[in-house]
Amino acid sequence: MSAPDREALRTHLVTARIAGDVATTREDNLMKYGLLAAGVPKSWFGIEPEGRWHLDDILALMAEKVGVSPDPWYLRGPDRIDADRTIDALDRMAPHLAKAARDRSRVLLATGHPAGLLVVHQDLARTLGAAGATVIMGGDGFAWQSTTRWGKVDRHVRYVGGVAVASDMGNLNHTHSAQPMRGVLAALAEAGEPPPDLVVADHGWAGAAGQAGITTVGFADSNDPALFVGEAEGKIAVAVPVDDNVPPHLYAPMTAYLLHAAGLPGG
């Protein structure tokens, strides 16, 4: 599809609820910010913070980077992602994609949201590969155990259209875990391969890559504060604020805009 201009993309993001009045509630946002402030390990997505982040620090950062309400007394109801902040972050992500294509870099793409963002990563994988980058698929089959409300379950890494996802053999799984990315990076090292030059990801896939010192760009919801903290500390190059679980086809204009901004075909 042809790439929208900034005004058209802003309108689409709000209409599709990728930004604007998103589905993620204020209650959920504040709960996740509180978990991060309390140092709950799984909430950090593999990021190891350098500083002490208090709840008021996290809320102020999320108001700045995402556009949620800065009011600490606003406790219930809808919250927002500012569409202009989303577009600004896409504009900051684009040069990383352009450089990867120009330098024929080794790029790894991964998502913890196969029901939403997978198609975005697949489009980027296809376009970057066609432009000369090497889309790597290391650690295919790496297995780990994930703790869910139903107990321990087995997961493994599977690549779908060049994009790493978590799978339980019969299904693709939503995950916040940093374990699969750590496993992928370890598998690459064991095979004598260098780490990726660029990672495009979300959730723990992004956090673990950024913590490992790899240039990492990706997407994060308003209830995913760890990646924005990682960006503030220089571990994540770019975190793009989006609702990360709208119907997949609704992301197409955003992807087209991003590719166009990077000067890549398809945008």
Image (cartoon, rainbow, N blue to C red):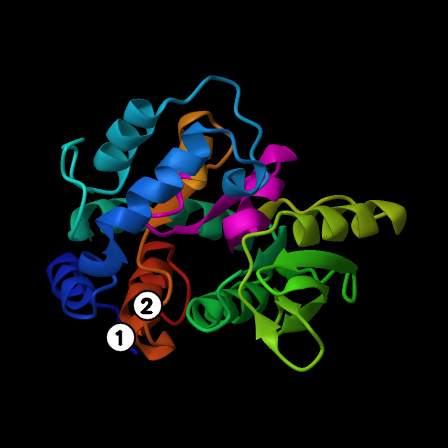
| Residue position marked by numbered label 1 in the rendering | 2
Write down the quadrant of residue 227 in the picture: top left
Residue 123 has which mark?
none
Please state which of residues 87 and 23 is positioned toward the viewer in this rendering: 23
Please state which of residues 9 and 14 is positioned toward the viewer in this rendering: 14
| Residue position marked by numbered label 2 in the rendering | 256
Location of residue 68 in the rendering, given as x and y in whole percent from the top left corner: 20, 42
Question: What kind of residue is marked 1?
Answer: Ser
As helix, strand or loop, the secondary structure at mark 1 comes to loop
Location of residue 89 in the rendering, given as x and y in whole percent from the top left corner: 31, 45
Find the magenta span and give its range.
Answer: 199-225
Tell me the crowding category of disc 2: few under 14, some 14 to 19, or many 20 or more residues within 10 angstroms, Cα based: many
Residue at screen point 62% across, 50% down: 105
Question: What kind of residue is marked 2?
Answer: Ala
Q: Distance between the Cα atoms at labels 1 and 2?
A: 7 Å
Q: Tell me whether the residue at label 1 lies in contact with that at label 2, contact meaning CB atoms closer than 8 angstroms.
A: yes
Residue at screen point 68% across, 49% down: 179
Would residue 70 be counted in the magenta stretch? no
As helix, strand or loop, the secondary structure at mark 2 comes to helix
Dot 1 or dot 2: first in sequence order is: 1
Please state which of residues 218 and 18 is positioned toward the viewer in this rendering: 18
Location of residue 152 in the rendering, given as x and y in whole percent from the top left corner: 70, 61
Residue at screen point 75% across, 51% down: 183
Q: Is residue 45 at all visible to an observer of this figure?
A: yes
